[in-house]
Amino acid sequence: MNTIKHVFFDLDNTLWDFRKNAKLALEKLYIKYDVEKKYNFTFDQFHPYYHDSNEGLWALIRDKKITKEELRARRFKEAFDNLGINNDELAAIFEDEYMETITNYNEVVDGAMELLEYLKPKYKLHIITNGFIEVSKRKIETSDLNGYFDTVTYADEIKILKPDPRIYTLAIQKAKANVEESIYIGDDWIADALGAKEFGMSSIFFDRLDDNFSQEGIATITHLDEVKKYL
Ligand SMILES: [Mg+2]
């Protein structure tokens, strides 16, 4: 892979530790609204329900079965309902305040800064994200990730999400790159690993949740350190 000149990254859970920051933000809201005292469920009991609801709904968005607005209307309601807290007003308050609260937390994925420092002198670095545009911008600009990337492509710019090849085409154009000299690194098997490969780009799957998906032609790593084996 020594012809590579451009390294494209996914943002959420590949570089910016969405799961960790989300958990910190939710715990803050959980305490703020006194949920444990009112309903007798601890935050640690609540959190897996939110995780399942949110991940399941994001998979439906990726598969074009629901919109982001539907996700926002449903994720907290489903998490609370499934746990046994039937309070739609509380769910609406959590959704309202969650996006604002999460931007107070800016933890990056373990090994991200070391990797970016290692890559920066040798390659042009870029991001392609399916996340909400304003939120994603803030995550990059207010975290340690700021200053490393030549281009950022937001799926929201053209209302098309990864793994649709049109988002990869847009990213390549913005980067003034060729697909042959580009590589993509991301943590979602379908949107990132398969999406990039089907577009014709070299692809590294960052298997953070030990999903163990694999396919010929896609490299798999479990820690960002391992990217150095390929670049
Ligand atoms: Mg991701």
Image (cartoon, rainbow, N blue to C red):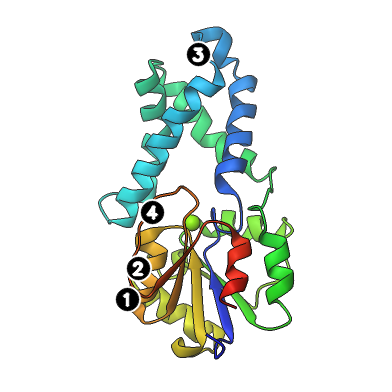
**In whole angstroms, how far apart are the C-alphas of marks 3 and 1?**
44 Å
Residue on which the image places disc 2: 194
The answer to the question of whether label 2 and label 4 lie on touching residues, with beta carbons closer than 8 A, is: no
At x 49%, y 35%, the residue is 95
- The kind of secondary structure element at disc 3 is loop
Out of 119 and 159, give the one closest to the viewer: 119
The quadrant where residue 79 appears? top left
Which of pointers 3 and 4 lies earlier in the amino acid sequence?
A: 3
Q: In the rendered structure, which disc, 3 or 1, sits on the residue that comes first in sequence?
A: 3
Please identify the quarter of the rendering in which residue 227 is found.
bottom right
Q: Which residue is mark 4?
A: 212
Residue 43 in view: yes
Q: Nearer the viewer, residue 101 or 189?
A: 189
How crowded pointer 4 is (Cα within 10 Å; few <14, some 14-19, many 20+) is rated as few
Whether residues under marks 2 and 3 lie with C-beta atoms below 8 angstroms apart, the answer is no
* Residue density around tag 1, few if under 14, some if 14–19, many if 20 or more, within 10 Å: some
Residue on which disc 3 sits: 41
**How far separated are the C-alphas under marks 1 and 4?**
19 Å
Taking the view exactly as shown, the residue that stands out farthest to the front is 229
